[in-house]
Amino acid sequence: MDKKALEALVRDMTTEEKVMQLVQIPGSEYEADAEITGIDRGQVKDSVKRLAGSTLGIWGSKRLRKIQEQYMKEHPHHIPLMFMLDVIHGHKTVLPCPLGQGAAFDPEAVKKGAEMQAREAAADGVHATFSPMADLCRDARWGRIMESTGEDKLLNSRMASAMVAGYQGEDLKDPEHIAACVKHFAAYGAAEGGRDYNNTELSEHTLREHYLRAYGEAIRKNPVMVMTSFNSINGIPATGNLFLMKKILREELGFTGVLISDWGAVGEMINHGYAEDQRDAALKAMMAGVDIDMCSGCYSGHLEALVNDGAVSMEMMDAAVLRVLNMKNDLGLFEDPYRGLDAESGPVITEENRCLAREAVAASLVLLENKENTLPLRKEKNAFIGPFADTKRLQSAWAFSGEDENTVSVWEAASEVYAPENRKVAAGCTMLDQDAVTARGICHIDRWQEENDKLLAEALRTAEWADTVVLCLGEDSTQSGEATSKASLQLPAVQMNLLREIHKTGKRIVTLIFTGRPLELKEVRELSDALMICWLPGTEGGHGVLDVLSGIVAPSGRLPVSFPYTVGQEPLHYDMYPTGRPKPVNGPFEYTSRYLDCENGALYPFGYGLSYTDFAYIDPRLSTQTMSIAETITASVTVRNTGDRKGDVTVQLYLRDVAGSRVRPVRELIDFQKITLDPGEEKEVRFAINEDMLRFWTAEEKWESEAGKFQVWICNSSCDGQALEFQLVK
Ligand code: BGC
């Protein structure tokens, strides 16, 4: 349909029809047995169901076809219904959770992964996904850190941009692509105390320089949608925030697509104390430019009256409706309302997709310790012990369209690699402590103590038999994601007990940690010979992990987020602002900015990760020591593989503006490159630094660079390397 025809269609619609294009209702309302992310069914009136412009949380071509046929018959203008779904790290073939994908430092692979997700979801009738989540996360207590690619704005920017490009492709009409939604705008990750849905207080310069960056970069890739966040920011809920939505999103970032609220967020402005009632909430969201009200009922209940009373102008209403109809048009729904709804059954998991997922898992694993080359595992007696040793629950709670039964467990993969006489398995303990609280409530296990005594005894027998114990520990998938904030970052006590008991046997221990968030691993480090973070690896989790354990693939993942010594350090991130009393390297420490009982920095910092080979960074250098505004200078280093096997390495470039009109972070990642080197091979890695990369939100509230001294590190993690220096002259 062309623009004129769309405008004519809007003119022909009644006010009620228009309002309903801006209403999204749960898919469960259309189908009794559909799965959905919460909320009771049967709350939506039939008149709303008949006209609502979009729905979410259901998939499957046969099921959706039935709904669309009925809907099209009843809709007065035969405008198709839009189906949206949270395809976060996989639809059928589930990739590592986003935090794991961040660890691979490989935007191209993330793009390929998003393309795969789009293909599978589109073949199941899905039109749009609520991804990428571009929230900057500096607080491991916040469970949704799992859905992000970490604590760094540059890494997040590249990953979120790659996801938008992968989901949407060149043309949304292409039946293998779906619409993307950049969320949650804005600063949802800065929730105070790491408690989900909590308020955020951020200075404008921290907001602009850090928190807005990844959304902004992803929005430059033209996502069809942006989602508002639940939190208030500096006293105003994001969903009614004119500064965020009008000034920043629409004016500065130039976003012209559909702005959708998060689930119920329009109505939640009443709880925030920002709107008096539903009508007021609908008005405030409309004024902020929210086009679609996801499931709060405020638009369906009150928007028509607001228009009739003149509180919301018809012009404003029409503009919002047109944005939604444009989206449907771009997806080709007017030509084919049944796009992706032909197949009798949904997409199947192909070998090709499994391969892609397997590679993604292997690339996401971060090796933190490898004392005396414990890894790769030798072909001797290996015992796989722990609650993650033989579980198929390796995907996050957000991968609800992927089925556990398709997942390969660690033990299943180990059985393909090691002969029966060289492998044994034991659960060792329950996943959770007694009566642990998860996102789904209290998880009570009958006869928990008895069960654990039995499991431990069996595990100890298995460990006695083994030469090496691969101890598979971690956080259950219901303990990260939405509404899973934690005030402790310890592994469950029952799992720590298992580790201590196995340690007493004196056997070599390789500890694998399956997790959606950073955990406190100080004691785990002390008791383990090797330690590797496996995240929530998804469908091919077992295979990817075994590829690295067995040595087929050398680990290359880097931490996308700092792992603390203790929860008391949170929020913890490498790119801090300096203080007037920095802690000196060698003391005296009195009256400096420090903890009495803990290091300042991370146990394992951002960017850190080991390989099975070693890399030397030879002669890091800058092409010049002075730079003018128009110039580009080159930072380069020769990287040599000094070990005896092939490996990948992520070379990182950090910068510090030594003095500015506002304080600047102690280091910021400004570029990275992942390269592969054969044993003995060396490559020159070159980075271009231009003036654009030196800009920040100055004291004059301008996005500019300032003349002066800069430091640069070309290195292996956020905590190492030698500083080089140059001057920016203006
Ligand atoms: C989450 C969003 C999600 C939406 C729809 C909300 O609770 O915050 O991230 O996209 O539900 O499922």
Image: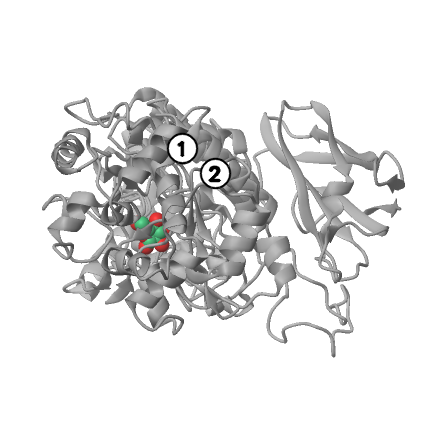
Give above or below for 202 relative to 416. Answer: below
Which residue is identified by label 1? 544
Closest to the observer, 146 or 472: 146
**C-alpha span from label 2 to label 1:** 9 Å
**Disc 2 secondary structure class:** helix
**Disc 1 secondary structure class:** helix
Q: Residue at x 76, y 37 (%)?
A: 689
Q: How many residues crowd mark 2 within 10 Å: few (<14), some (14–19), many (20+)?
A: many
Give above or below for 300 relative to 340. Answer: below
Amino acid type of the residue that numbered disc 1 sits on in the rendered structure: Gly
Q: Is residue 654 left or right of residue 43?
A: right
Q: Is residue 571 left or right of residue 540?
A: right
Q: Do residues under tags 2 and 1 come within 8 Å of each other at their CB atoms?
A: yes
Q: Residue at x 62, y 62 (%)?
A: 204
Q: How many residues crowd mark 1 within 10 Å: few (<14), some (14–19), many (20+)?
A: many
Give above or below for 192 relative to 392. Answer: below
One can see residue 358 in this view: no
Q: Is residue 161 left or right of residue 88?
A: right
The percent coordinates of residue 642 (x first, y second) are 69, 30
Closest to the observer, 519 or 105: 105
Q: Which mark is residue 364?
A: 2
Amino acid type of the residue that numbered disc 2 sits on in the rendered structure: Ser
